[in-house]
Image: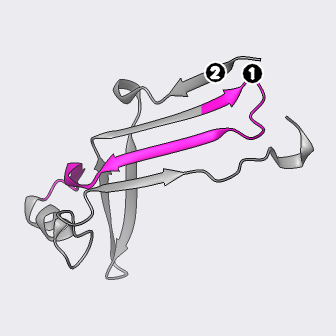
């Protein structure tokens, strides 16, 4: 069985978030620079390898002052930790189905 790899299409995808601020309002934002993929043996997702990466410096909340604060050591510390990443360690289909 051959490997199959799916990759996020950044032109047709977005990574966004919403955070409640002071219990009054929501702040929305996104990461503009990101990649992600799923690699499988054949068409089954069992034991798939899932990877995701976002560049912290690409954060955008439509407020430059807030974005600068989020990049600071008080939050993401982008100089020290420039990337947000996820790599799966296991992947099993729910309900016992492949």
The number of callouts visible is 2
| Left or right: 8 in relation to 45 | left
Label 1 or label 2, whichever comes before in sequence order: 2
- Kind of element beneath mark 1: loop
Dot 2 falls on a residue whose secondary structure is strand
x, y percentage for residue 26?
34, 67
Q: Split into 4 quadrants, where in the image is the C terminus? A: top right
Image-based side of 8 in relation to 58, left or right: right
In the image, is 88 to the left or to the right of 17?
Answer: right
Q: Are marks 1 and 2 in contact (CB under 8 Å)?
A: yes
Q: Residue at x 72, y 47 (%)?
A: 91
Task: Give the Cα separation between the discs numbered 1 and 2.
Answer: 6 Å
Q: Classify 53 as above or below 8.
A: below
Q: Residue furthest front?
A: 1
Q: Is residue 42 magenta?
A: yes
Above or below — where is 90 with respect to 45?
below
> Between 59 and 61, which is closer to the camera in this rendering?
59
If the image is split into quadrants, where does the N terminus sit? top right
* Residue at the limit of the structure toward the left, as seen here: 65
At a point 40% along the width and 26% down the height, the residue shown is: 12
**Identity of the residue drawn at 34% across and 25% down:** 11
Residue at image point 66% right, 22% down: 3
- In percent of width and height, residue 83 lies at 31, 54
90 in magenta: no
Mark 1, Cα crowd under 10 Å, few <14 / some 14-19 / many 20+, is few
Q: Give the magenta part as a residue range.
A: 39-63
Q: Position of residue 30 (x, y in %)?
A: 31, 50
Q: Is residue 9 above or below residue 62?
A: above
Q: Which residue is mark 1?
A: 42
The label on residue 4 is 2
The image's colour scheme reads one colour
């Amino acid at each position: 069985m051959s490997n199959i790899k799916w990759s996020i299409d950044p032109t047709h995808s977005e990574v966004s978030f919403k955070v409640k601020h002071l219990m009054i309002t929501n702040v929305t934002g996104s990461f503009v620079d990101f990649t992600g993929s799923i690699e499988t043996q054949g068409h089954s997702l069992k034991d798939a390898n899932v990877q995701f990466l976002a560049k912290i410096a690409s954060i955008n909340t439509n407020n430059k002052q807030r974005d600068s604060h989020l990049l600071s050591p008080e939050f993401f510390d982008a100089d020290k930790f420039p990337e947000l990443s996820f790599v799966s360690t296991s992947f099993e289909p729910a309900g016992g189905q492949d």
